[in-house]
Amino acid sequence: MAILSQSSVVVPPDVQCDCGGNHLPQDHWEFLESMPQQPTDMVDDLIKMGIYKSDVLDLANTLTQVEMREALLLRELGGGNPAREAFCRELLQEAGGLDQAMAAAFGVHATEFFSNTIRSGDYSRREFMKRVVVAASLIAIGSCAQDATKPTDEKSSTGSATGKLEKPQLSIGFIPITCATPIVMSEPLGFYEKHGLKVTVKKMPNWAAVRDSAIAGELDAYHMLSPMPISITLGLGSAAFPIKLASIENINGQAITVSLKHKGKVKEAKDFKGFKIGVPFPFSMHNLLIRYYLAAGGLNPDKDVQIFPVPPPDSVAKMSAGDLDAMLMPDPFNQRAVYEKVGFIHMLSKDLWAGHPCCAFAASQSWIDTNPNTFRAVNKAIVDAASYANNPTNRTKVAAALIERKYLNQPLPVVEAVLTGKFEDGLGNTLNVPDRVGFDPYPWKSFAKWISSQLVRWELMPKEKADYEKIANDIFMTNVAAELQKEIGQTPPATLEREETLKYDRFDPKNPASYVDEQIKKFKV
């Protein structure tokens, strides 16, 4: 097929354009090409044309200087927190403006002005003192704002605990798996409503769709795999787009499931050689954990097996059709494979790393900035729901809420088996593992660092992008989650990170780069 150049396209005359005029579309291009490219040049041209008069420019200059000083001060005092900035703005309005507040407190005539207020009555005295108090308050807030912007952690006070919700009706995307339990159950069990929100959860087909929808801003927030905010923010496998991990949805809750045709033949990692293995997404804990397991068992995950992404809802059917020999998938699909007599559970993911993160609640930086109070409320609702779901006495009620067609659309016995930890493994054994899945919302910084280290190990992240501290501090909103946990009566951890204990090694978050080097040296891959 021939490709036409721009110059070879013939456009008939008198075409009505979007602007309402009758001319060739290329006239727009030519006009824009002739325009000044720098804003200062354009302003100069407009002044020369007489569009702006000198007295108007003088007034604009004065206003701009005052407003700019005030805007810069508010931005500094806000420390990146829109709620704090709005509070400072209200203080200034109460005082009659920044200039009046500061002049009253620190101006060269402050003493004289104070004497005058004493003579002129209570009202003036109150007005003067109000301005002095406002100035002092702004200084105190400024000190707090500087502390809040220290690089040891992300800015923790996103939104106000009691602020007006900018957007009370929301849509949140999710994948139909038990990892999404706090996000999904909050709709039928009333946790969103409890926190002043009306939320519709929308089922998504796969993780690529979640990523693309988040970048396009189609929904308000999302259920994501915990590595996804890192990969999307850094532009790994997609356009770079800032995403925040607000809270962890679940810990544990995954499994390595093997096709029944291999029953009796698979005992350890080396027995997976030549297998076709499904994972939900390249940037997933599942991909990182199966690679960790295989490499420790002497296999090269990039040479000795085939690992490829499979949407979780398709995984059981693909295993049944012979397209998968094994999979490390989120539940309930491991249990569903047992239920359908398609596969058996080889290992729970908790046996690779007890307490590992899996999924998360996430939102874009731009959405959080636009809706800080709403973000705080919805995150709080999900943290609240996670606490409820983590209580073993609530698991059967939660399971009943999740099985509806618009949510997980799964048989009740399958979901109950996952949530209660009382399950058949497909090999004739009935097991009782209460911590098969947990719902702890605290996003440890060490989670972010381990994930990043493994992305580097398997060449999913260039080494030069692996600024471990910055990734953990900028993307994982640990302090915010801790604040919300305290507000609903929970006791979050007192530290931001911890040493993580895995099946084959220990991870020190202070030395993630050394950890990768040691892994490669020890396991030869």
Image (spheres, rainbow, N blue to C red):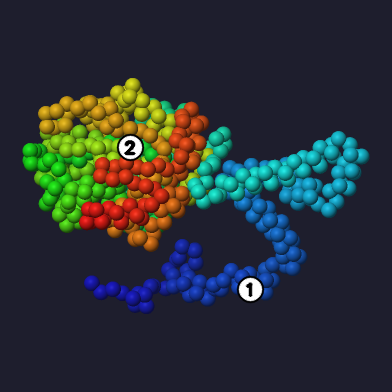
Kind of residue at disc 1: Asp
User: Which disc number belongs to residue 260?
Assistant: none
Picture coordinates of residue 106, whole percent (x, y): 79, 50
Tell me which numbered mark, 2 or 1, is placed earlier along the sequence. 1
State the residue at coordinates (87%, 41%).
117
Classify the position of the N terminus by image quarter: bottom left
Q: Which residue is mark 2?
A: 355
SS assignment at label 2: loop
- Choose mark 2 or mark 1, whichever is in front: 2
Q: Which residue is mark 1?
A: 45
366, above or below 381, in the image: below
Residue 177 in sight in this render: no
Picture coordinates of residue 501, whole percent (x, y): 32, 41
Q: Residues within 10 Å of mark 1 (few under 14, many from 20)?
A: few
SS assignment at label 1: helix
Q: Which of the 4 image quarters holds residue 16?
A: bottom left
Residue reaching furthest to the right? 119
Picture coordinates of residue 388, whole percent (x, y): 39, 27
